[in-house]
Image (cartoon, coloured by chain):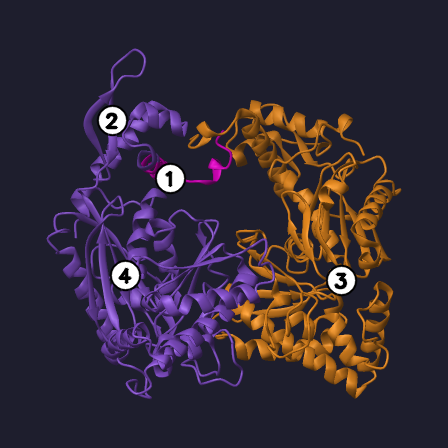
Chain colours: A orange, B purple
Amino acid sequence: MGAGSGTVGLRTVREANLGVVLRTVRESAPCSRAAVAAATGLNKTTVSSLVADLMARGLVRETGRTEQHGVGRPGVLLDLDDTSVAALGLEVNVDYLSVVAVDLVQRELTARHTPFDAREAGPRESARRIVAALREAADDPAVRGRTVVGAGIAVPALVDSPTGTVRRAPNLGWSDFPLGESVDVLGFPVRVDNDANLGAVAEYRVGSFAGTPDLVYVTGEVGIGAGVLTGGSLLRGSGGFAGELGHLELDPGGPECSCGRRGCLEAVAGIGAILRDAVPDLAPGRPLSGEEVAALVEAAVGRAAAGGAVAVAALERAGTRLGRGLAALVNLVDPGLVLLGGYFVPMGPWLLPRCRAALASGVFAAGPAGCRVEPSALGLSAAARGGAAGVIHALDSGALPLPAAAGTA
Amino acid sequence: MGAGSGTVGLRTVREANLGVVLRTVRESAPCSRAAVAAATGLNKTTVSSLVADLMARGLVRETGRTEQHGVGRPGVLLDLDDTSVAALGLEVNVDYLSVVAVDLVQRELTARHTPFDAREAGPRESARRIVAALREAADDPAVRGRTVVGAGIAVPALVDSPTGTVRRAPNLGWSDFPLGESVDVLGFPVRVDNDANLGAVAEYRVGSFAGTPDLVYVTGEVGIGAGVLTGGSLLRGSGGFAGELGHLELDPGGPECSCGRRGCLEAVAGIGAILRDAVPDLAPGRPLSGEEVAALVEAAVGRAAAGGAVAVAALERAGTRLGRGLAALVNLVDPGLVLLGGYFVPMGPWLLPRCRAALASGVFAAGPAGCRVEPSALGLSAAARGGAAGVIHALDSGALPLPAAAGTA
């Protein structure tokens, strides 16, 4: 049954099988080695060797309990080892730095959210802050002593994810910055990706609709981006630049966008645009600083909640615009579910009804292919959670860290 | 190394392996059974049994030549049997019926293009015509005597492809018609899909850019649809309705669309809209009949070629609109290549320059993710070719016909 294995090296086959066994333990724990063998079709000797390897790496442990199957020795039950490794995730955005650590079962060990102005700091200083934040997280009492198996970094940017180079981040003012290279001093692998992509990964792995294979996560920050998951995989496109929902032309004569063009969705329904419209007396005409954004969102939502007509009308207008933008996405990609993240979550009560109505009236296949729009439950840490979740998921695909002794942070 | 095979039935494994061997012969022919074993990792006894099965089905043949590898008996060389089977493809559109037959190496055996007004005929009469056209093709001198292994039917519609039900085809005036069921009288399997999807399959398998895994095929008929290929697979979305490029809102106050909304891309840059703009004295105000479309396209292209200012300006305007629509697609999906099909091909000399310019100015990632736009070389038979190509490709995945004796059309 080894069709195709002739083209695969032995090391790769072993890694793939380590991933298969890890995934099987994740799905069926507690389970015996014999049960793993039965579920995977691998023979028992191979399974025992793979399990020993996974135990040495701190990924699988024996529970101490046994299970009797027919005659012969009782099988020792295995489970994931949720005490030995950790994965980190970090998001750097226009106005904050968000860091999380999770264990092997995607449980959050620690999380921090810090106001940070990545535009003012510039890419080099931001890279230094990212390294410091990841070191701090690895040294957090809840993480210390674990092997950090990797980190995922989210940036609101076109990212060349194989190299970790940030190609273009208009809202940060960065371009062609080798972020992956700049943070490669941590002793564990680091992967850089687009914030919306990692938000989609987080929704798929740990969000309220986890396991939904076709979904879109939309960032609600100063920029708007979409992470598109189809059949459980990220839609990256030929250059890795799919999902640029924010730069959809919505209003040809509209206001100037950070990208230099006019009337992009993000220029009329990004958080900056919404705030200028919702709290015009408080929002300055210039780009907002990191700390201003959070404060102004709170003010806008507070006024809308108190029935302030200007704020309510602004949020409703933004909802309609967002719905028109989503209609283009749904007509082209047909996800069954769109999750609105970031600051769109607190604005949801005013944004969502208009957004859903505009979407429904703009979608050709509205009847058969109705698309739900829901607020994300992951808040501002979605992309960071996705960065960490992606590292854990990569283990299941056989991208394993070195044995425990060698890979500690 | 049989990870995962525990969950797969033996018949399925054998079918998958038949596909693997067929694919290997396709890629490496002429080649011996021993070479197939080496390339696939399957053992020689298994390969011999699978090859015997493929020969009985008329898919693989012995060339009569041999090859000496080291000591032992010389190996008989195998090749694809391009004389025994055929696959059919058919497209029904607003103004024509197009049928092709291909052999196992995707060579065209026969092709017919007939003016046909599927709107006027209605779905039941159209289904009868489709059955007749497929029977005629199977009985064509170039096809007769071969086993027809299946047919793919293309419709400009939202199609529920697992069941073959046409959900919504506004340009044909059909809705919720069980086309797959209605044509299931032919003695070979028939699969119904969206015309743009099958156009994309055709481009990937037999077009000028065959093998490009990320590409979009855009239909240039009365309707505009997009078939999106990512990583060599069709992007279908959660309900199978992805790629509805024609119903992207381009001009909110624009003309009414067949779908009932206003300003859709297809209402301002579909062939009907272009003709009303390019040859206003010839084009009637009502929807065009099947035969009118082809004649008016010829007239419009003729006038543009002769320097007619009205025709040239209309085609250029359509090019700009199309480029704006493509920009949304490229921002969201990032294909590296867009192929314009159908009547956009003869209109290309006037359409393409403006289309490319509008696309470039509307794409956020224009620099790093530049997207080529080219005319399709497959003409009006692209979707039909895709239908047939998909049937042949399914063989490589193990979806095999019955042994030759039992499955003849």
- Same chain for the residues under marks 3 and 2 in the image: no
- Same chain for the residues under marks 2 and 1 in the image: yes
Is B50 drawn above or below residue B277 in the view shown? Answer: above
Q: Residue B381 carries which label?
A: 4
Mark in front: 2 vs 4: 4
Is the residue under label 1 in contact with that under label 4 (CB below 8 Å)?
no
Q: Which residue sits at x=57%, y=22%?
A: A45
Subunit that carries the residue with mark 3: A
**Cα distance in 3D space between marks 3 and 2:** 62 Å
**Cα distance in 3D space between marks 4 and 1:** 31 Å
* Relative horizontal placement of residue A242, taking residue B108 as reference (left or right): right
Is B408 drawn above or below residue A18 in the view shown? Answer: below
**Cα distance in 3D space between marks 2 and 1:** 22 Å
Mark in front: 2 vs 1: 2
Asked where in the image residue B273 lies, by quadrant, the reply is bottom left
Mark in front: 3 vs 2: 2
What residue did someone put label 3 on? A379
What residue did someone put label 2 on? B77
Asked where in the image residue A70 lies, by quadrant, the reply is top right
Magenta span: B1-23
The picture places residue B262, in percent across and down from the top left corner, at 48, 83
Q: What element carries label 4?
A: helix
The stretch drawn in magenta includes residue B14: yes
Mark in front: 4 vs 1: 4
Which residue lies most toward the left here? B141
Is B69 drawn above or below residue B24 in the view shown? Answer: above
The picture places residue B70, in percent across and down from the top left corner, at 32, 13
Question: Going from the N terminus, do you reach mark 4 or mark 1 first?
Answer: 1
Subunit that carries the residue with mark 1: B
Q: Which mark is residue B16?
A: 1
Question: Going from the N terminus, do you reach mark 2 or mark 1 first?
Answer: 1
| Mark 3: few/some/many CA within 10 Å (<14, 14-19, 20+) | some
